[in-house]
Image (cartoon, rainbow, N blue to C red):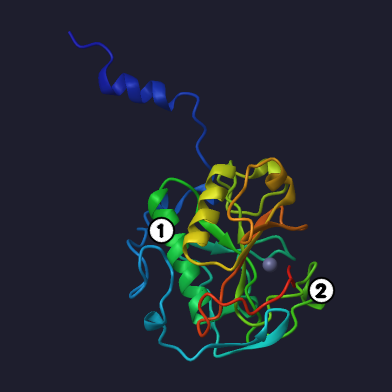
Amino acid sequence: MLVGGAGAAAAALGAGIAAPSASTLPSQALGVPARVGPPPGVPSSCRVPHSALHGRSRALGLPNHGRLANGIPFPQETDYSFTWDFPLGLSPNPQWRRYGSEKLVLTLECVLSAYNAAHPNLARVGVADLSRRGGGPFGARYGGLGHSSHQNGLDADVLYPRKDLCECAPDSPNDVDVARAQELIDRFVRAGAQYLFVSPALYRRHLLRGPPNIVIPLAFHDDHVHVRIYPDSMPGRRTTGPERG
Ligand SMILES: [Zn+2]
């Protein structure tokens, strides 16, 4: 006689497991397939080659004193990402706050879709501000603390994944799933990021780390990592000074 079996195991498994709320369900649980593979022409490292760029977007000037020509918006929502409005504390982020160079948008799409493919049962990753349409100043008059950089389509704020899988910004470093946050940082390093500004609290405790010339602790980054990429025209060349944020 069979006792237990799959039915009993399923019943035991179900007992005591709280059902996640709709807002914390990963996209796959909602029946949305994750995109497989990087964007066309982009290698699995997510280092975007010039040949993958078809637009005419140009990062002009510097991240803290510049403009963005022919930028494109990062999508409001995909099967692997959502957007986050920091000043209002909700999703989505309005389109005017999320214009980037084509290279930045492809880099984000590649890294975040690969992360999602590796973790289909975790939450999607949140993307907050890139640059304004056309770039230029993005200070406090645009809401919240504002940004000194984010002016020429090379900067993006990416939310750290949360332990509780909420698709929302961490309220404190204790909310951060540091293993998954570190994985995101590693993926952006492999993708050729110039700088990754991270939480000083997590960096001090060696919970977030990386090449010291790239991964840099900076105040006001306890809920997100600030990603800065090189402009397409000058791969590998440092064009920016110490301006941050
Ligand atoms: Zn930022």
Q: Residue at label 1?
A: 114
Mark 2: amino acid:
Ala
Q: Relative to 198, is 55 on the left or the right? A: left
Q: What numbered label is drawn on residue 45?
A: none
Front residue of 154/166: it is 154
Mark 1: amino acid:
Ala
SS category of the residue bearing label 2 = helix
Q: Residue furthest top?
A: 1
Residue 132 place in picture, x, y as percent: 66, 81
Q: Nearer the viewer, mark 2 or mark 1?
A: 1
**Quadrant where the C terminus lies?**
bottom right
Q: CA distance from mark 2 to mark 1?
A: 33 Å
Residue shown at 38%/58% (left/top)?
32
Binning the other alpha carbons within 10 Å of mark 2 as few (below 14), some (14 to 19) or many (20 upward) gives few
Residue shown at 50%/78% (left/top)?
235
Residue 216 place in picture, x, y as percent: 68, 58
Front residue of 97/92: it is 97
Q: Relative to 178, is 2 on the left or the right? A: left
**In which quarter of the view is residue 136 placed?**
bottom right
Vertical position of residue 233 compared to residue 115: above or below: below
Q: Relative to 107, is 6 on the left or the right? A: left
Binning the other alpha carbons within 10 Å of mark 1 as few (below 14), some (14 to 19) or many (20 upward) gives many
Residue 141 place in picture, x, y as percent: 82, 77
Residue 42 place in picture, x, y as percent: 37, 72
**In which quarter of the view is residue 135 placed?**
bottom right
Ligand 1 within 8 Å of disc 2? The answer is no
Q: Image quadrant of ligand 1?
A: bottom right
| Residue 99 in view | yes
Q: What numbered label is drawn on residue 140?
A: 2
SS category of the residue bearing label 1 = helix
Front residue of 165/182: it is 182
